[in-house]
Image (cartoon, grey):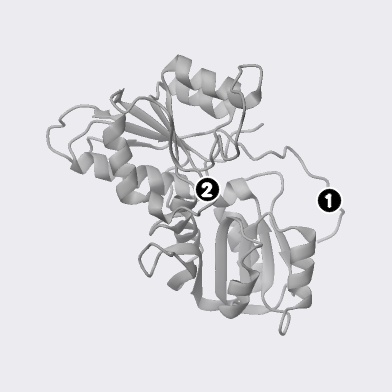
Amino acid sequence: MEPVNTDVSAESDGPAAAVDGDTGAGEASGAATLGMIQLAVEELWPESLAEDWDEVGLVAGHPGAEVHRVMFAVDPTIDVIEEAIDFGAELLITHHPLLLKGVTSVAANTAKGKAVHRLIESGTALMTVHTNGDSAVGGVSDVLADALGLQNVAPLTPAANGLPEEGIGRVGDLEEVLTLGDFAARVFGILPSVAGGVRVSGDRDGLIRRVAVCGGAGDSLFGEVRASNADVYVTADLRHHPASEAREAAVNDRPYLIDVSHFASEWLWLPAAAEALGNVLTDQGHDVEIRVSNTNSDPWDFILTPGGD
């Protein structure tokens, strides 16, 4: 699979960008321990913001181990793990959990077991920041909303245990009215290049201003999207029946729908997350190098489409 396109944003340094933990700080006190980084991660993305069904936090690793290098990625796939090992990372932080559902074995002849064994044998810790990273200020949907130029942003679903501005999804307004076609082109332009591209439901010339977004799979939020009076909803993994029912329930054809890659919608958060963690560790005087994975873990390799516009 091709690596992530590095030209995803004019404001981004690309997926290979490194955040040097000692930049801009005084003399560093040295490497952080894994336990120290756990506390920094908790400060940025509190576990209390995670959904009840989610599994976040430390998956593998000893809290007392020193950490000199950290890698951020969307998925804890074997390719990503090998990239982290090659980089020399003592810690891999992924958005998606490795062990979300219960397992009865981590034998190395299974996919999950192979990943666990490779992590432990290489001395690479694994940490998950999932729905807590979605909900937190500066999280996945905040970064997506910011990249699209939304203003007056608020959560679609406020967090039960967070600040008023925290929660799942975001809704906000464009600075100026755009056609659906032009806005879809903006969406396409900010995301990493993946096989699935961007799918759009609605009148290409329809006018929009109010936009709802949810990084990752968001077809459970249609009720909240309608209540927000959004003209268009940008999310990933829109299934046939929920999307069809949303079109049937639309008022004046709204909300229009824009379906993007799950991986691509969440990858945008990685450089921002790496920078945020780097800033916290810098403030604490730690010398930690942080990098964003180059591995494209979108599961699709190519797509066939009919001709036409």
Q: Point out residue 85 in the picture as x, y percentages from the top left corner.
A: 46, 21
* The quadrant where residue 179 appears: bottom right
What residue type is disc 1 on? Thr
Q: Point out residue 197 in the picture as x, y percentages from the top left corner.
A: 69, 51
Q: Nearest the camera: 74 or 97?
A: 97
The crowd level at tag 1 (other Cα within 10 Å; few <14, some 14-19, many 20+) is: few
Whether residue 308 is situated above or below residue 297 in the rendered picture = below
Quarter of the picture holding the N terminus:
top right
Q: Nearest the camera: 7 or 290?
A: 290
Query: Is residue 130 visible in the rendered structure shown here?
Result: yes
What residue type is disc 2 on? Asp
* The quadrant where residue 220 appears: bottom right
Whether residue 247 is situated above or below residue 132 in the rendered picture = below
Q: Which mark is residue 305?
A: 1
Residue at left 52%, top 33%? 294
Q: Which mark is residue 54?
A: 2
Quarter of the picture holding the C terminus:
bottom right
Q: Which mark is residue 21?
A: none
Residue at left 56%, top 37%? 75
Assess whether mark 2 and mark 1 are in contact (beta carbons under 8 angstroms).
no
Q: Is residue 207 left or right of residue 131?
A: right
Q: Secondary structure at mark 2?
A: loop
Q: Is residue 265 left or right of residue 237?
A: left
Whether residue 113 is situated above or below residue 264 in the rendered picture = above
Looking at the rendered image, the disc whose residue lies closer to the viewer, 1 or 2, is 2
* The quadrant where residue 65 appears: top left
Q: Point out residue 273 in the picture as x, y percentages from the top left corner.
A: 39, 46
